[in-house]
Amino acid sequence: MVLVGGKGTRLRPLTYETPKPALTLVDRPFLNYMTEWLGSHGVDEVILACGFLPDELKKVLGEGEPGGPKLRYLVEEETLGTAGAIRFALDHLDERFFALNGDVLADLDLTALWNQHEETGAQATLGLYEVEDSSSYGLVDIDSDGQVLKFSEKDPTRTGTGLINAGTYVLEREAIAAIEPGREVSIETEFYPSITGKGLYARPLEGYWMDFGTRQRYFDASWDILEGRIHTEVEKHSDGVFIAAGAEVDPTATIGPRAVIGAGAKVASGARVTGSVVLEGSEIGADAVIENSIIGPGVNVAARGTVGNEVLGKNEIGETVNA
Ligand code: GDD
Ligand code: MG
């Protein structure tokens, strides 16, 4: 089960019309990286718990990729929170299942997480990841057996490194069934504290992990994919540069270092695109200069236009979003 009900506010204007899991990251919708990762650990069906723009999600993601997990959609009429959304899906869930935040780009060992869960007989097992700044994440204290001693949701005043909740869980259906239905319940601030000491376990995992919530992390994720820091197949143009098949780039344009030119995009003569992502169907005029920006989809930048440190979304030209 993947939670995709959030509004992606920190990635506006890109997320006004496109929910975050459907945003293009390099060469595919973001969620496809997640289903590829889940599929590589034996998952064959994914339930998407949707709230925001479910039709747009269905339009972009469909039934999933050929050979990958099949996608199903459950739509909440009202916000149920992270645990309430899982409770809402109860009738569709197996005895034991993975639940994930829908905005992480990761390559962690889910099989090891599942195995530990079975060995300890836990009600819930959380995948943890070590980060340098834990302030925007849930911090998790564990003992030497992996039992959770304390779960503390994000706290902007906290400083320093820590083992954080990677938004990657193995859950028992029975534990979720105990949640009262139809009410907004947070898995982080209500459910996990309520089962601490009663079968709540965690396991630190190594590998790649990133919460894909801000503009800066959108860039970081793009370059991590294009520079080989995450395992996935991508047909890059050169290290750090991706140009979609069918994009029209004039031979006199300069693309990169670090750039993504999406499907159907056009870059005219003499233009320069550096450290930027030009999304599908956008057009960059002759001699325009695009630096550290995300353009599109479907946005036109005039000839000799300059765009620096901006995110230009559909119908939202000129709006700047803070990282
Ligand atoms: N269906 C549904 N319904 N999904 C929801 C809801 C809801 O009511 N609320 C949030 N979600 C989804 C979001 O779409 C996102 O994929 C995920 O749940 C987590 O919500 P975020 O809003 O992205 O939370 P966060 O990033 O601040 O913090 C969470 O993730 C961190 C790791 O990335 C927490 O789980 C932290 O503890 C964790 O460290
Ligand atoms: Mg998040």
Image (tube, helix red, strand yellow):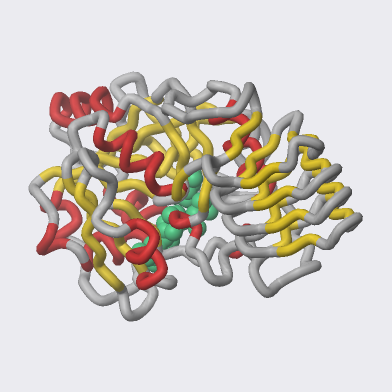
Quick check: 224 left or right of 157? left
Number of numbered discs visible in the structure rendering: 0
Q: Position of residue 33 (x, y in %)?
A: 40, 39
| In the rendered image, the vertical position of residue 144 relative to residue 43, given as above or below | above
Q: Is residue 75 above or below residue 302?
A: below
187 or 247, nearer to the observer: 247
Q: Quadrant of residue 89?
A: bottom left
Q: Residue at 75% x, 29% y: name it.
A: 257
The answer to whether 188 is drawn above or below residue 218 in the figure is below
Left or right side of 177 for 213 = right
Please report the residue visible at 36 percent of the width from the left and 60 percent of the height from the top.
Answer: 82
Residue 44 in the image: state x and y as whole percent.
Answer: 17, 42
| Lateral position of residue 111 relative to residue 261, left or right | left
Q: Looking at the picture, how far across and down is residue 220, in whole percent?
A: 64, 36
Any part of residue 225 in sight: yes
Between 7 and 272, the residue placed more toward the observer is 272
* Residue 319 relative to residue 67: left or right: right
Residue drawn 10% across the image and 49% down it = 94
Q: Nearer the viewer, residue 137 or 25?
A: 25
Image quarter of residue 50 = bottom left
Ligand 1, image quadrant it occupies:
bottom left
- Residue at 63%, 64% (x, y): give it: 298
Residue 247 in the image: x percent, y percent? 59, 46
Residue 186 seen in render: no
| Vertical arrangement, residue 51 with respect to residue 231, above or below | below
Residue furthest toward the bottom?
A: 77
